[in-house]
Amino acid sequence: MKNQVTKKLIALMTASVLSVGLLAGCGSSTDTSGTAAVAPAETTPAAANDAQQNNAAETTPAAANTETENKGTITVAASATPHAEILEKAAPILAEQGWTLDVTIFDDYILPNNVVESEEFDANYFQHIPYLNSFNEEQGTHLVNAGGIHYEPFGIYPGTKSDLSELADGDTVAVPNDTTNEARALLLLEANGVLTLKEGAGLEATVNDIEEKKVDVEILELEAAQVARVKEEVAFVVLNGNYALQAGFSVANDSVAYETSDSEAAKTYVNVIAVKEGHEEDEGIKALVEVLKSDEIKQYINDEYDGAVIPFEE
């Protein structure tokens, strides 16, 4: 974990749970001090019986059940935006159920999978299914989808130019360089007339599969997190939804073009909760997925992200 960038976003307990704990603590000290202060003054049998009944009422099973059972901690590795933000909204709901959600932010696409494979973390939330499958194949990991949560429309965003019709020979377009996201970027560029891919290239397309370009543009391949950082130096950037958000782009207002909600890409690239094989049915994982798919979280996503993040409907 030497290379991870850590930021604890989630409090161990919500305010409601903390207040219960504080009341319980006060109750303990009151019991002790109350016995010493009150008992000498009220020495009659009736008073003693009343006190016993009151104490019994305070410790009945019904009263004890007002405290939330502590079911444990769920550790999740996540990208900052929007994944960790969505998890932050899920944390209080999980806390009401007795779960503590512990989120660590990563700024790359490798470590979050490695720490789940090693079982250092219970789950991660940052990737879509094609990337998950590709990572397993290339790295020999055993990660599986525990639940689809949302998808992020891929978009083409302005750099030094604002309309694709302005592209000219010598211009540069920056795209992610990982296998599945590069293919997605190239397919979006193809759909918008910038280039043509070889027949059948599909979701495995790379720059080597470009058959023809509308103009002689350079396709600059960069690590996904770096693409937005060169927007002032290239004509256009093609971005994952989360990196577009981090760069301050709005899909609805800023993109030159983006994947539509009913596109095959939107269905293919759903972002998931990933766990190591065999942990899909763990109680904490099931609780996490259920909350992330709840109406409350769906509403938050729709309100917060202006179409850049869309809840996944199965």
Image: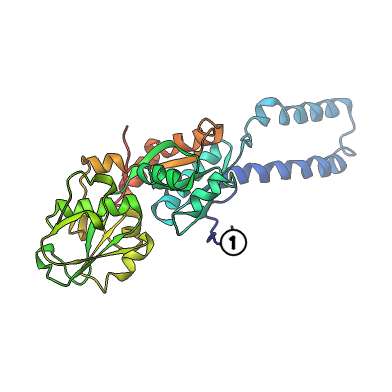
Nearest the viewer among 294 and 261 is: 261
As drawn, is 95 to the left or to the right of 146?
Answer: right
Residue at the image point whose x is 38% and y is 46% from the top: 131
**246 lies left or right of 14:** left
The image quarter in which residue 243 lies: bottom left
Return the residue nearer the eye: 216 or 242: 216
Q: Residue at x 24, y 45 (%)?
A: 202
Q: Secondary structure at mark 1?
A: loop
Q: Classify 10 Å Cα crowding around label 1: few (below 14), some (14-19), many (20 and above).
A: few
Q: Is residue 111 left or right of residue 168?
A: right
- Which residue corresponds to the image point at 87% horizontal and 37% vertical from the top-left? 39
232, 56: nearer the viewer:
232
Quarter of the figure with the N terminus:
bottom right
The residue pinned by badge 1 equals: 2
Reply above or below: 245 against 277: below
Callout 1, which amino acid?
Lys
Q: Position of residue 276 (x, y in %)?
A: 52, 39
The picture quadrant where one finds residue 28 is top right
Does the rendering let one see residue 77?
no
Tell me the quarter of the picture where residue 101 sits: top right
Give x and y (percent) for residue 66.
62, 32
Q: Nearer the viewer, residue 87 or 28?
A: 87
* Residue 274 pos. (x, y %): 46, 41
